[in-house]
Image (tube, helix red, strand yellow):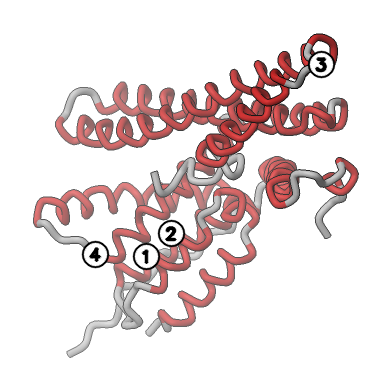
Amino acid sequence: MVNIIEKKNRVRELINQSSFCKLLGVQEKLLYNISNLPDEANEEEESALDALQKVIELPENDSDMRETIAIFLRLDEIKARRDRDPNASIDDLLVPIN
Amino acid sequence: MNEQPGPKQEQKTKSYKSSVEEVVDYLEGQNEKSRQRRAEGRAKTPEEVAQDVRDVFRAVKFFKNKGSDIKSIGKETFGNIIKNPWSLDDMLTQGVAKIQKTVAEHMREELEKEAEIKGDTLKSLLDVEEEEQRLAAMRANLDVAEALLHDRKQVLTGGRQFTTMDPTGSLKDKVEQTATRRRESGQQAADSFFGNLFGGL
């Protein structure tokens, strides 16, 4: 029998690592909906988790998408830094994320 | 006797295409189940996760179909910021508005494709209606972004006039008021380039 708790943890880990989910701003929502799934093994929940895992992995396996995502994450970071500190210098805003 | 879960599909070779096919198969099956649930008035948590799959998949399709367009917008926005750092806010707003416009175009194309393929069956009309509602929310967001962009252009022009023609400061006050307003509406329009565009509408 598939351990659905392990599967949930695996998908949670993928969501946390996914730069695409971060860019879409959906990490919290996805994690919340997963946490609401029951822990008993059930074919429907299992297939939902499998599908979620596959769709999250798609952008990570595509070099073009990864490149585009990286550009926009950097722009989002510039935007967020600007919002936090409207007086920040352009040099500070452009320092790449670690 | 407890039944074991049915044998899972053969593990396919990991590839973009095979993964897409599996997700499409899942979503097609899920559409029918969702319809049944709605008809029976049931709301269940797996349905929420299924909606998450739809949202993320919709975004993946957008990134595949409009990949070169959005990459160009990203690079152009970044280049504009480097060239015009004093107009950073305007460059970011312009970039966000362009992305939202591209998303809206993509959604429209997808809807048209959907309607064309499925014809005028009730099922397709229901699907299209759902999508139209999401698109309407997106358009409202786009309108705000475009109004914001217009505001910012005015502020830019006003700012230039201020340096040469407004030594008393009245225009400066006006510009500051507009800046406050645009900051507030800007945050409503988009805290990020893609945030909430494909989910939570």
Badge 3 is on which residue?
B167
Q: Which subunit holds the residue at mark 2?
A: A
Packing grade of label 4 (10 A; few <14, some 14-19, many >=20) is: few
Q: Nearer the viewer, mark 3 or mark 2?
A: 3
Q: Which mark is residue B58?
A: none
Badge 4 is on which residue?
B44
Element at label 4: loop
- The three-letter code of the residue at mark 4 reads Lys
Judged from this view, the residue extending furthest toward the bottom is: B1
Badge 1 is on which residue?
A47
Element at label 1: helix
Q: Are marks 2 and 4 on the same chain?
A: no
Badge 2 is on which residue?
A51
Element at label 3: loop
- Vertical placement of B89 versus B151: above or below? below
In percent of width and height, residue B200 lies at: 40, 49
Q: Nearer the viewer, mark 1 or mark 4?
A: 4
Q: Are marks 3 and 1 on the same chain?
A: no
N-terminal of the pair, mark 3 or mark 4, is 4
State the separation of the CA atoms marked 3 and 1.
Answer: 67 Å
Q: Which subunit holds the residue at mark 1?
A: A
Q: Residue at x 54, y 28 (%)?
A: B145
- The three-letter code of the residue at mark 3 reads Pro
In percent of width and height, residue B3 lies at: 23, 83
